[in-house]
Amino acid sequence: MQTFELIAPCHFGLEAVLKREIYDLGYEITRVEDGRVTFTGDAEAICRANLFLRTAERVLIQVGRFTATTFDELFEGTKALPWEEYLPKDARFWVKKASSIKSKLFSPSDIQSIVKKAVVERLKGQYEVSWFSEDGADYPLRVFLMKDEVTVTIDTTGDSLHKRGYRTMAGAAPLSETLAASLIMLTPWHADRILVDPFCGSGTFPIEAAMMAANIAPGLNREFLSQEWSDLVPKKVWYEAVEEAQDLMDLRVETAIQGYDMDESVIGIARENARRAGVDKLIHFQRRPVAELNHPKKYGFIITNPPYGERLEDKKDLPALYQQIGEAYERLDDWSMYLITSYEDTERYIGKKADKNRKLYNGMIRTYFYQFLGPKPPKRQRRE
């Protein structure tokens, strides 16, 4: 079976989480860059990466890398790549996206046009035709330039992997599914521990946690472009990967995952999203303000995305709200709290300095992931 260099883009700053996922799937990582992890794998890896990776945005086949400082070099470098090994004669292909950072070539539209022309010229010679019908499967190309190094790829995914298929409706300022999964995986939370999101909105944190607890592959309820690439990724390989995902699922797992929100209509959306994800039986959703947050058990986790006043008129409410978060956390004996927010006075009003914080981007918004670490629970005594 053909071996590929595969690139998985992710949220900037969360490469280590994605690396761990790829290692856990059994693949060798060859390169880590800002927001991208490259690994080697065959057609089965394309299927399994799309189905199982929780923190990647998509899975790309790297067709080649080369240096280009002029459009002539870009054309010739692209034309020299073995496109006939990837694109069948009837392929519908176009350059979906071009991006350039710190490179002499910086116009995305010009890069897109030249790469497309170069691929056409290569395939004309290989297939001995002067015109392509392009009425077959879709093969969108993505091109990245970083410091004059060109990386040319084919997107195997289609819609971004954060589109799991369960979230048809979202509340205000939703967190993407891939970012939510990454943040949960940055914490030591496990399925046998309590998890509460007091600002659950459309339910992304609780749903992603429940899918992890039940070992539900995040891509199980959606489709991918490469399912139509029977020459490159045989249908049988897809069937086997889906069968593996179905076999690993365990909906009998016991969980203590809870989502609260002030807005009853938003709680309704969260319940419907959880039902669509197949985890509604694993999560308890309830209308409840953060001021009433309490729990009788120790060693739980708060993981949440509280409001951070992106609109100026909301900013005035933030000091009181973050004070309530701090007071609620104070009442929860031996708990840990993790929250992502752009609010610069978070620690001041919570009344406690975070043990760690990490700068992250939620879309274009610069945020911080504050980590207030509680003690580890005592190890259970093994019975003789």
Image (cartoon, rainbow, N blue to C red):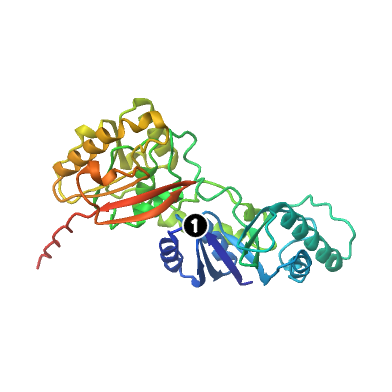
The residue that label 1 is drawn on is: 10
Dividing the picture into quarters, in which one does residue 310 lie? top left
Task: Name the residue located 81 percent from the left edge and 64 percent from the top edge.
Answer: 123
| In the displayed structure image, the side of residue 305 where residue 133 appears, left or right | right
Q: Amino acid at mark 1?
A: Cys
x, y percent for residue 193: 24, 51
Residue in the foreground of this view, choosing between 368 and 197: 368
Residue 215 visible in the snapshot = no
Vertical placement of 260 versus 372: above or below? above
| In the displayed structure image, the side of residue 90 where residue 367 appears, left or right | left
x, y percent for residue 59: 56, 59
| In the displayed structure image, the side of residue 226 where residue 337 appears, left or right | left
Task: Name the residue located 9 percent from the left edge and 68 percent from the top edge.
Answer: 384
Residue 205 visible in the snapshot = yes
Task: Name the residue located 78 percent from the left edge and 69 percent from the top edge.
Answer: 76
Say what secondary structure mark 1 lies in.
loop
| In the displayed structure image, the side of residue 129 where residue 347 appears, left or right | left
